[in-house]
Amino acid sequence: MQDWLVGLTTAVKHQKKNHTDDMFSVLKYAVTPFARNTLAKMHYSSEVSIRLLPSYKCSFEDPVHVTVSGLNPQQRVNLRSKITDEKGHVFKASATYQADSSGQVDLNRDPSLGGSFTGVEPMGLFWALKADVVSSKFTLIDVTRTQLVDLECVSDDKVIAKVTNERHCMADGVRRIPVTEGRIRGTLFMPPGKGPFPGILDTNVFRGGPFELRAALLAKRGFAVLAFAFQGYQDLLKKVDKFDLEYFEEGIDFLRQQQEVKDQKIGLLSISKSGDLALSMATFLPGISATICINGCNANTVVPIYYKDICIPPLKFDVKKSKMTPSGLVDIGDCMNDPMSKEELPSVIPIERASGKFMFIMSEADRNWRSAYYAKLACDRLKAHGKNNYELVRYEKAGHFIEVPYMPFCVANFHAAANHVVFFGGEPKAHSEAQLDAWQRIVNFFKKHLSAADHNCRSML
């Protein structure tokens, strides 16, 4: 027993020395024979190590360089990744690799020979993460909590090396401020410093509450972001029969009143249903400089939108138009009526009245609804009114939820309107590439049109 304790003490000292002397994250054990035998029962090797470069800690949207060393020449191993969301759903990926003549595997160089993906995919163990239950959408609500991705190297069904990638949602100095001002609800994310910072109202919601990850990451880039809740959060109504733009106007006014945001430009960021809300705000509310609509609709949907004496009725839909996919999921992609039909024209948002800039991001494989068609209609309408204040970004094989980089792909989930698990379309790899590309476009668009300084805060480590 004493030998075992001495061995573990030696291992701890060895790890601390590596942590101090080496910038890399290395999981490696150098212990006495007795301790090594004990650890062998835990399936760890004394020679094999996994490194994450530049560090095992990073921001959620950042890539890491994965390497394995200490293998036998040409040895085949299985690399596995795993992350557990806040609901306890486990998302996994795996791939088979063959070491080179020096016993190393480099994911930036070496192809996967099989598994969740094939070929050279430096971040494949991240974008290919998926749950056993096909309808699981990765749940991330608490952005103060570090997201842990466990990576393992497996040989002959034994784990021979392991490391954990700590992916942080907030950067050093970013302030998270819960908002309960009057009737408005949400969370404000403020960059470090005194500002001034341009403001963004982010209307992306998840299960009723504001989806804070995107807002937190944008605050890292120098934007003051209000993740805005408008339904089913805290004391807000779970079901509504209308949306009142005055409520959203109050949210924008609250953002403008912040000392760090005064006299700065304001932008809107939306996805899915909140897209028509953002387009309506950009159309009817003053002072909106830039609006991004991700896989939204050019017409109002679900319930009427009111602003003063204006009412935009919702686009109608017919669930009887839904169909089943070969995998048994419900496809509702064609259930919405055509906004250009005579009876539905009153639902179309007159975005030509807006004075700000637009970016429409759309997925051609989206099966939540016809995002590509709606984005084209919106751009055609602006063009027909002599406007060139828009950009259109297309992704051929992406699905509905284009989120931040390395957010696990969601192919299906429960849809309240359909009262069923529905198919959202897209292919995992193409969707991941779209998220990576769209994220940089979003940041650049807001920097260009909101005149943000380049505050790229370092990640909270």
Image (cartoon, helix red, strand yellow):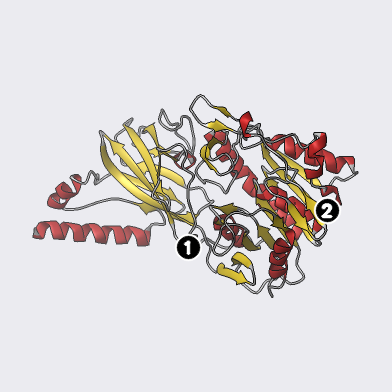
The residue positioned 59% from the left and 70% from the top of the image is 180
Q: Position of residue 171 (x, y in %)?
A: 53, 63
Quadrant housing residue 92: top left
Q: Nearer the viewer, mark 1 or mark 2?
A: 2
Depth check, front residue: 317 or 451: 317
Relative side of 337 to 4, left or right: right
Q: Quadrant of the N terminus?
A: bottom left
Q: Residues within 10 Å of mark 2 (few under 14, many from 20)?
A: many
Q: How many marks?
A: 2
Label 2: state its secondary structure. loop
**In front of the other: 123 or 256:** 256
Q: Amino acid at mark 2?
A: Ala
Q: Quadrant of residue 213?
A: bottom right
Can residue 259 be seen here? yes
Residue occupying the point 48% across, 27% down: 327
Q: Provide the residue designation for mark 2.
A: 354
Residue 338, position in %: x, y?
Answer: 75, 34
Residue 416: percent from left, percent from top: 56, 44
Query: Residue type at mark 1?
Result: Thr
Residue at 9% from the left image edge and 60% from the top image edge: 2
State the SS at label 1: loop
Q: Which residue is mark 1?
A: 144
Tell me if residue 387 comes above or below residue 193 in the rendering. above
